[in-house]
Amino acid sequence: MGKIRSLTLWHWYVGFAALFVGLFFGLRQSLARAGIWAKYDYYQGLTLHGVLNALVFTTFFIAGFLYLTTENSLKRPLRSYALAWFGFVVLLAGTVLAAVPILTGRASVLYTFYPPLMAHPSFYIGLTLVVVGSWIAALVVLRTYLAWRRENPEARVPLMFIATATTYIVWFIATIGVAAEVLFLLIPWSLGWVKETNPLLARTLFWYFGHPLVYFWLLPAYLAWYTIMPRIAGGKLYSDPMARLAFMLFILFSIPVGTHHQFADPGIGSNWKALHAFFTFLVAFPSLLTAFNLAASLEYAGKSRGGSGLFGWWAKLPYGEPVFAAFISAMILFIFGGISGIVNASYNLNMVVHNTSFIFGHFHLTVGSAVTLTFMGLTYLILPRLSGRELFGRRLALVQSYTWLIGMLIFSFANMAAGRMGVPRRTDLGLSTYSFPQVVERLEKLSALGGVILYASSLLFFVVFLGTLFVGRRSKERSFSLPVTEAYQTEAEAPRVLDNWKVWIGIAVVLIIIAYTPVLNQVLEISPFGSPAYSPSLPVPLPR
Amino acid sequence: MRIDPFEKFAMIVGGILLGAFILAIAYANFVWGVKVPTCEVVTRPFSKGAFIETAPKTYEVQVVARMWYFDMGTGKNEITIPAGSKVTFFVTSGDVVHGIKIPEKNINIMAIPGVVGRVQTTFERPGEYLMVCHEYCGIGHQGMYAKINVIQ
Ligand code: HEM
Ligand SMILES: [Cu+2]
Ligand SMILES: [Cu+2]
């Protein structure tokens, strides 16, 4: 299984390099919005921040990580390494093709690239290759699974693989939407083969993809919390069957909900928006199951470590262990992420927060913390194993996790409060020509303080990362196996249907058809293919 | 499959909570009239703003969002109305995607080229209401706003 080493490592090198650049612009944005160090191209930076953090870092990290979980759970080598490396090359090529136009200022369209703002074609082609590269990674995992199935026709699918496969199933169904948007609408339009495009249709296809995208980020974090964290905490997973159920519910409900990002859009009936809102509430349910299961697992761990009573076990958890510190901080932040997510999902309540700074206050708790901090914790766990060196700077790693926790609480609280007062997101607020009540200015300063703490915290992470690679003490043994958690209620108790992919994917497809047929129908009827292309810097259509 | 009694309890409480949220949403929608924009089939996209008093204290504003101003047919970036006016905004875009947020009202709508959205509100209190563009629309985005002056 030694071949996995460089495969995962290289995915992570590229992923974290992207994050390193992306986070710098996070710092700049939080400062610029408070009017500090504001002279730069804000929207180019924001495009880099969104694309590098949310698309490039996540995709590379997840691809590398899920190769590892596939081998660990199925206990057989990937099929095949050559294909996996090919996928890596495609991902990398796509990233370069998308990054060059952003860096040269020809794609300042943000990571959602809503037309009719138009980017250089290379941006769209690059993003397409990133998606294709991730499909190749999914194919490698699928082929490995099929080979395992042939070798083990009767075996239960291990929970770690359930989580791995769920991630890719959701991702594959989701990316069909963005592939359709980019291949059929945006690439022909940006190359000039088609003169006019359909903005509302593009948005609808984007958000068909955009919501399950967040589950593509989140499910690998859930994987870590369910199958690794309890063992790190010194206990067991409380219930393997309930974990399986949660993952299957994510397959069902993470996709037919995308219109909840379009509650404020005209051209889509409020009745269909209400249907998507209802499904969104259903997708909150597996997260509630997760909260219970993980809390019970932590209680089991705390009590195994000698804690007692209703809350006494809470004090016994290994807070001084860097991996656990990162996981627990991520989970605490995710509680607030989940609650603010319910606010966003609440249909008419969304009218208060849509496109305000409340929104990025929310998602820095989810993708920016629950996901990113869990991935950092996984790095503290796995990088020493892959590199054959001990973790460099355990203390630094601990400080990193807890400063992220504090910085993010400040940052997201400030931005959610400002959002409640109507402060818009995606705005170079430092240069705005309108003004808000005085208190907003103070909230933006607070947000900048949070941003500085977060950025400092991320630098600690990179010190630990590079330190481990280059100056960490060599450890005697190398191992590529993950510490997989045992379950208290085991898979033997789970009904067979919980490993039956066909059933769940089948129901998911039916739900998607129910949720999206009326929406697409309406959009195609009402919204014309009538928009010429615009550059972000000119108020007239581009001559073509 | 064995489900722990505690877990059953947690699931039921979670379910009730989600149900209560849904009821609250329905209540705000039907009783308070806090609606989300819907699909307008009657009004076709327009390219010029207009500010029309359709009845005493009742206005219709046709807003065309453009890079980087709101055309409301008044020739400047503001409208003036008496307190207690009921205003219906018809919103579209003349170029790229924009958005409208009136922080002190539950007005929040995207301006998308090719389609028209409609929102309605009543301005009870006199004062100056800010209306900002809340979707990135190019380099002038941070300067895109208008004002609604509500006078006695
Ligand atoms: C040092 C830590 C970070 C800081 C200070 C920071 C700051 C910010 C700020 C202020 C914005 C809003 C800008 C605006 O709407 O005008 C933003 C947007 C965003 N951030 Fe972060 N961020 C950080 C880390 C992250 C991480 C780790 C991720 C994800 C992996 C992330 C993903 C995003 C995304 C997707 C957006 C939205 C971009 C858009 O609206 O197009 N950020 N960030
Ligand atoms: Cu969503
Ligand atoms: Cu704008």
Image (cartoon, coloured by chain):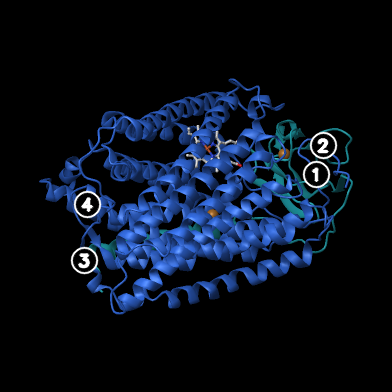
Chain colours: A blue, B cyan
Q: Looking at the rendered structure, which numbered label has been put on residue A231? A: 4
Q: Residue at x 35, y 75 (%)?
A: A149
Image quadrant containing the N terminus of chain A: bottom left
Residue A478, relative to residue A502: is it above or below?
A: above
Question: Is there a contact, CB below 8 Å, between mark 1 and mark 2?
Answer: yes
In this rendered view, identify the residue nearer to me: A318 or A395.
Answer: A395
Label 4, secondary structure: give it. Answer: helix
Furthest residue toward left: A306
| Mark closest to the chain's N terminus, 2 or 3 | 3
Residue annotated with mark 2? A538
Residue annotated with mark 1? A534
User: Subunit of mark 4?
Assistant: A
The x, y position of residue A398, in whole percent, is 29, 33
Residue annotated with mark 3? A489
Amino acid at circle 2: Leu
Query: Disc 3 vs disc 4: which is toward the camera?
Result: 4
| Mark closest to the chain's N terminus, 3 or 4 | 4
Q: Is any part of residue B20 visible from this angle?
A: no
The x, y position of residue A317, in whole percent, is 20, 43
Amino acid at circle 4: Arg
